[in-house]
Image (cartoon, rainbow, N blue to C red):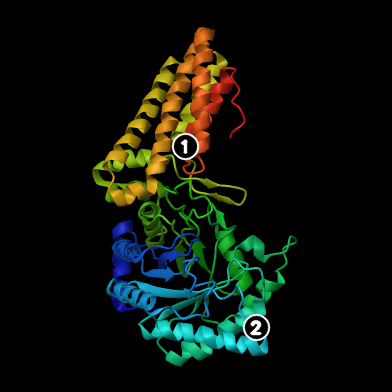
Amino acid sequence: MSLKNILASVLLAIFVQGSALAAPIPLRGVVEGFYGKPWTQAQRADMLAFCEAHGLNAYIYAPKDDPYHREKWREPYPKSKMKKLAFLIREAQTRQVRFIFAVSPGLDFSYAPLHGAEDREKLLEKLEAVYAVGARDFAIFFDDIKEKDGSGQAELLRWLDEHFVAAHGDVSPLITVPTEYYLPDMREPGGAVKPYTKAFSKGLPKTAVPLFTGDGVAMEGLPRETLDGAAALYGRRLGVWWNYPVNDYMEAKLALGPVGPLPKDAEIPALFFNPMTFEETSKIALATGAACASAPESYDPQTAWEAAIREQYGDLAPEMELFADQSQRLENNWAHIGRNDGAALRAEMDDFWRAWQSGEDVAGRAASLRQKFDALQDAAELLRRKLPKEILRECKRQLKQLGRLAEADSLALDLLEAKRQGDEKRTKKLAKKLRKKWENIANKEKEARLSEATCRAFIEEALRHAGEEPAARP
């Protein structure tokens, strides 16, 4: 890192933390590493500008669905695509951002003596071509492949270290991602190191920087014990590939929350945040990640999140905060990351149900909830009218879904009021109407999801408490 970059990092850390100095993570940035439609040239240039503005000093080019990065890694980039790469490399240099060119050859790379030699030369030609247009930072990734050849992969990296990195003298140490890239996958059930990880970690060049994703592919939190455990296996500190706000496994839901805090005293050589295919709406989480990476000791997720939304949305910040609050958590059978959607609203709902079940007067609580639902509906409508078109195209479906949810939640309160008053005819009528809205919401979840455990759950809870069990979800 140049003296100019070091001074900039120090000044940024002072600005973020105030009087106390926090050490920035040395290499910090964005990895375009998601599955799905790669970003456009304009989006990448815009993200480089975003990195410069937020103290991020690195950008990894690794789009999974760029065929020349992964499936067709042996083939050279066409001239038109190489020109675009050259432009991005120059753009990154002017913004003091390291453009890290990545190749993922692991799908079909041959480690056999004959074909392996041919493949090594093909890979070297690929790297040399990008070097020729200005790149000086490179990465070789082996993630998400079936074959686990730790020895072969490590040998390839040593060969590249000798024949490419050392041969030039001005190329940075290689960055890599192993095939076993989160800590539980590196160990046997009994705790022993798996053969792949043992071979790969032992054979790596001493200067190479491996990245891992923590306790899972996408898991909330990064405990110090996890960082230390990975370091113990590799005999060096690992960098972190953080899978938030990436949503390529759940594109119907936007990840609009903050990045969780890192251990405040951790030694992390590199930290990269994997974004969504939606470049504009990724910026909320990425801005919080930049704050975290620049000053981990003083990072507060809520403060950084609010600041990011104010900076990016100006007069629309209050409405955007209401919307983003309901779209933070990504949850499936292997991903558990992001803050709970609408946590404060969920707590208020729980208090409402406690009072309802105990027979207390819930009129005041119902009025407060209705006010919250109205605010969500108004925010969704205003954002649909006022957001810039490049942002709106990324979140329009979710805004419509939030409007549906908030409207149905208000109807749920009407249903509960009718039930408490003993008006059976009105209760049946409202329950039928609410079920219809709920079914429409469920059908729309293929294209737009948010607030599953809060706004959507309240609809189902209201139907049950009114004695009108909701039908199975479509």
Mark 2 Cα shell of 10 Å, populated few (<14), some (14-19), many (≥20): some
Task: Tell me if I can see residue 19 in this picture.
Answer: no
Please give left or right for residue 403 compared with residue 386 in the image.
right
Marks 1 and 2, how far apart at CA: 51 Å
Give the residue type that dot 2 points to: Tyr
**Residue that carries the numbered disc 2 in the rendered image:** 111
Residue 252 drawn at (x, y percent): 48, 46
Local secondary structure at mark 1: helix
Along the horizontal axis of the image, is 379 left or right of 356? Answer: left
Q: Where residue 110 appears, x then y in whole percent? A: 63, 81
Residue at the farthest left position: 315
Q: Quarter holding the C terminus?
A: top right
Task: Give amino acid for label 1.
Answer: Ala
User: Which numbered disc flags the more N-terminal residue, 1 or 2?
Assistant: 2
The N terminus: image quadrant: bottom left
At x 45% / y 22%, what residue is drawn? 411
Note whether 458 is above or below 199 in the view shown.
above
Task: Give the residue at mark 1.
Answer: 343
Is residue 175 in view?
yes
Q: Position of residue 437 (x, y in %)?
A: 48, 27
